[in-house]
Amino acid sequence: MNLSKEQAYALQCIIRGENTCVAGPGGTGKSYILSELRSVFGDGLVVLAPTGLAALNVRGATIHSFFKLKPGLYNFEPKSHVVPPHLAKLLNKAKAIYIDEVSLVRADLFITLEFILRKARMSDQPFGGVQMIVAGDFLQLPPILSKKSERDYFKYHGQLPYCFDTGAWLKARFKVVELTKNFRQQQDPEFIKILNSIRCGDFTSRYLLDDKELDCIEILNESVEIRDQPPEDTISLCTTSRRASEINLNQMDRYESTAARFEAKCHGKLDYNNLPTERHLFLKEGVRVMVLKNIPSVCVNGSMGTVVEINLEKSSVTVALDSGVQAVFIQHLWEELDYILEEDEGTGEMKIFTEVVGSFYQLPLRVCFAQTIHKSQGQTFDECHVDLGAGTFTTGQLYTALSRVRSRNGLTLSRRIRYNDLKKDLHVLQFYDENGAVQEEV
Ligand SMILES: Nc1ncnc2c1ncn2[C@@H]1O[C@H](COP(=O)(O)OP(=O)(O)OP(=O)(O)O)[C@@H](O)[C@H]1O
Ligand SMILES: [Mg+2]
């Protein structure tokens, strides 16, 4: 594995045992270094993410399922928490905890898991002394405060939703290592500059386009195709899930062929709000799908393609992948994992093993004409259509959407970007000013 110097430096800090925050713009390979961490820590590494899809991206569990927490609001000053004995044993055995997409982890949840770790490990050290590795970009989407009661609670306490605005973060003295070498957009260097300006909410920097000096918004509006409808075979990234469903349904209707229905087989404990694809999956020939499985030298999780044949007798679906290869898909088994502690038969040592608590059996395909920008955080696309609808409504939304695609050749917009689509969060910029930009040479 060829890590950039900065990635190697982040890895070095982690190996030294420091609580580390791997930060930096989208596409700089924050999640990429996880495979190195897996070989460094082995079974002692617990891999977590705030949402089901983000967990799927890194082959980990969600924070809520791992810590046995119900969704909801948690006290900023936890006084007591019953840690199930099985979880306590597990937490005592963990060498390190890795959390991806940490920008989406809300402050109350971060405080709670820090408290649980101290209790479970009977230690006053931050996070009970377990090494924490977090990765993410706080200038992408912020944690969600969906209910008014939640927003009121945060406002009343003068608390930001981000995990860095907590005592837990301060006590753990996270070393923030900012990655800057962009791998995702490396074929379009000017796009990298534009994206970096948008990320920091700065449209005063001017760049050249055909000898005209323009700001980043003007340059994108001039150099990217604007169209009502997405180009055929291109995924739309939408600000709202309602708009994404609307596009998915509209696009399905365009196809004359009859819809085939595939029913999933579900067993055990499953998080029905975060299934990888539909339980009742409707497919039609000609429909765009995303593959949700890696098949070595054929496709990876996230590859796009078009359904060319449905065989109901065999329950199989043939997909013409965008890479030019055709592949036949049958139902795939997903296992919902949990972590358990067991004695290693060889050494007699207690070790962490994963336990299957539920299963979901369905075609590894998702109809994918459109999805929310929120769901797309962490993903890379060759082509995408950004549907800004009535406008972005939260900070980082425009940047997260635009930074998914590798180059401007693969990008189209539903309308021109407006200056008020670019929403910056001064608290995050201040956090980066004070803590970021540790880019030491190795
Ligand atoms: N050292 C590397 N060598 C080759 N490719 C790399 C390297 N690091 C990252 N990449 C590739 O760059 C792309 C972006 O990497 P990755 O998804 O890890 O970025 P990220 O910083 O986690 O982005 P995001 O903020 O969007 O989650 C991926 O396709 C990944 O495989
Ligand atoms: Mg990532």
Image (tube, rainbow, N blue to C red):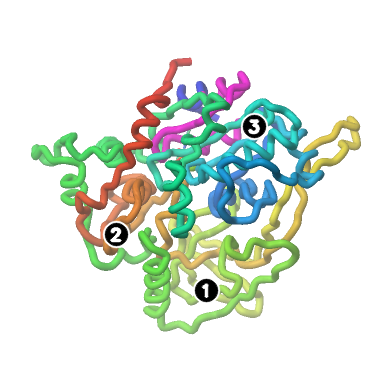
Q: Nearer the viewer, mark 1 or mark 3?
A: 3
Q: Position of residue 195 (x, y in %)?
A: 29, 40
Element on which disc 1 rests = strand
| Residue hosting label 3 | 127
Q: In the displayed image of the protein, which residue is found farthest to the front?
A: 156
| Residue hosting label 2 | 388
Write down the region rendered in magenta.
Answer: 10-36
Q: Position of residue 186 (x, y in %)?
A: 35, 36
Q: Name the amino acid type tagged 1.
A: Glu
Residue depicted at x 44% and y 71%: 287
Q: Nearer the viewer, mark 3 or mark 2?
A: 3
Q: Quadrant of residue 371?
A: bottom left
- The answer to which of marks 1 and 3 sits earlier in the sequence is 3
Element on which disc 2 rests = loop
Q: Nearer the viewer, mark 2 or mark 1?
A: 2
Mark 2 and mark 1 residues within 8 Å of each other at the beta carbon: no
Instruction: Tell me if residue 31 comes above or below residue 11 in the rendering.
Output: below
Mark 1 and mark 3 residues within 8 Å of each other at the beta carbon: no
Give the class, few, some or many, for how many residues have Cα within 10 Å of label 1's Cα (few <14, many ≥20). Answer: some
Q: Position of residue 280 (x, y in %)?
A: 59, 75
